[in-house]
Image (cartoon, rainbow, N blue to C red):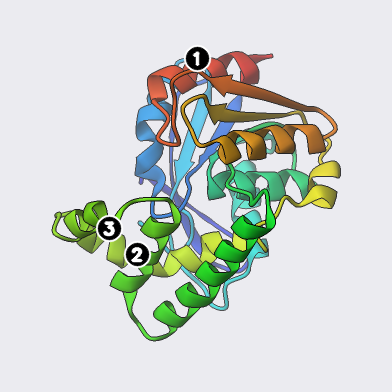
């Protein structure tokens, strides 16, 4: 990360800014840092002033306790100030939920786009998320970072064989290092259900995206976001999953944010 800005509570937020044009901030999801979005930022920087950042508690950004979702919205406010006072926002997964909260908070958001915010679409999904929250809180409270990572990977639908393989990989140590931030993503998701009143209060246009190869409930949730936002639009990207390919996503975002 090349630069740092100071959030309202005194936390330093690290970010990288590339390209020229209208300001665009990219927001990562769980178990990731700003570097995760570098491959998306690169093509977008040909038309936009693109900022990627480490969300608080991960990467090169600082952390100030106690955590609150409002502090993450303030982080985005500080970044928007740093890039000129107005920006468009893109967020993936729980990062998309943060983008929607920021847009609803009254920040100067020109346009917003989100990819597969994993809102629960039925009681069974909501119950599973509540159980995840309880078990995650217990694991992190006891310092069991590895168990917390496993809980998250199971929530995403990975099988036990894949998880066992991941534990043996070089990336596992890095995942453990930012495991406490899983609680932050969980908090950003609220109770896991679609926040109808929050979405209805968003005045900026919102593009809600999903992959055509993703689970049905993911596409349903993305469509529900678009329907709940007054200026919402839904679009499915053929052949894509939750691990969306930057080369497919970038042109879609570029067309939308340039409008």
| Front-lying residue, 71 or 125 | 125
- Answer few, some or many: residues within 10 Å of disc 1's Cα (few below 14, many 20 plus, some between 14 and 19): some
- Residue under pointer 1: 251
Q: Secondary structure at mark 3?
A: helix
Identity of the residue furthest to the front in this view: 124
Q: Callout 3 environment at 10 Å: few (<14), some (14 to 19), or many (20+)?
A: few
Q: Residue at x 64, y 44 (%)?
A: 99
Is label 1 in a helix, a strand or a loop? Answer: helix
Give how far apart the Cα atoms at labels 3 and 1 are: 35 Å
Spatial separation of the CA atoms under disc 2 and disc 3: 13 Å
Q: Earlier in the sequence, mark 2 or mark 1?
A: 2
Query: Looking at the image, do the residues carrying marks 2 and 1 touch, with CB atoms under 8 Å apart?
Result: no
Residue behind mark 2:
149
Q: Earlier in the sequence, mark 2 or mark 3?
A: 2
The answer to which quarter of the image holds residue 205 is top right
In the displayed structure, would residue 211 be above or below residue 178? above
Q: Is residue 240 above or below residue 182?
A: above
Q: Quadrant location of residue 204?
A: top right
* 148 up-or-down from 107: above or below: below
Task: Read off the residue under disc 3.
Answer: 160
**Left or right: 5 as drawn, with respect to 159:** right
Establish if 227 lies above or below 193.
above
The answer to whether 165 appears left or right of 131 in the picture is: left
User: Residue at 59% of width from left, 43% of height from top?
Assistant: 117
Measured as percent of width and height from the top left, residue 172 is found at 22, 59
> In this rendering, does residue 116 appear at all?
no
Q: In what quadrant of the picture does the C terminus appear?
A: top right
Would residue 89 be found to the left or right of residue 36 on screen? right
In x, y percent, where is residue 129? 57, 63
């Amino acid at each position: 990360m090349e630069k740092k800005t100071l959030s309202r509570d005194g936390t330093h937020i690290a970010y990288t800014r590339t390209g020229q044009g209208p300001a665009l901030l990219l927001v990562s999801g769980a178990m990731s840092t700003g570097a995760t979005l570098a491959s998306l930022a690169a093509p977008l920087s040909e038309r936009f002033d693109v900022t990627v950042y480490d969300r608080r508690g991960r990467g090169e950004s600082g952390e100030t306790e106690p955590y609150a979702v409002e502090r993450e919205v303030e982080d985005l406010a500080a970044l928007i100030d740093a890039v000129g006072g107005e920006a468009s926002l893109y967020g993936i997964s729980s990062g998309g939920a943060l983008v929607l909260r920021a847009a609803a908070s009254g920040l100067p958001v020109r346009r917003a786009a989100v990819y597969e915010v994993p809102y629960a679409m039925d009681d069974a999904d909501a119950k599973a998320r509540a159980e995840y929250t309880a078990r995650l809180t217990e694991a992190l409270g006891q310092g069991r970072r590895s168990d917390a990572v496993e809980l998250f990977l199971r929530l995403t639908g990975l099988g036990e064989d894949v998880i066992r393989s991941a534990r043996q990989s070089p990336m596992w140590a890095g995942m453990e290092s930012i495991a406490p931030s899983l609680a932050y993503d969980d908090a950003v998701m609220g109770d896991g259900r679609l926040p109808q009143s929050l979405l209805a209060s968003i005045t900026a246009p919102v593009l809600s995206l999903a992959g055509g190869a993703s689970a049905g409930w993911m596409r349903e949730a993305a469509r529900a976001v678009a329907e709940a936002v007054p200026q919402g639009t839904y679009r499915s990207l053929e052949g894509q999953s939750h691990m969306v390919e930057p080369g497919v996503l970038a042109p879609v975002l570029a067309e939308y944010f340039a409008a």
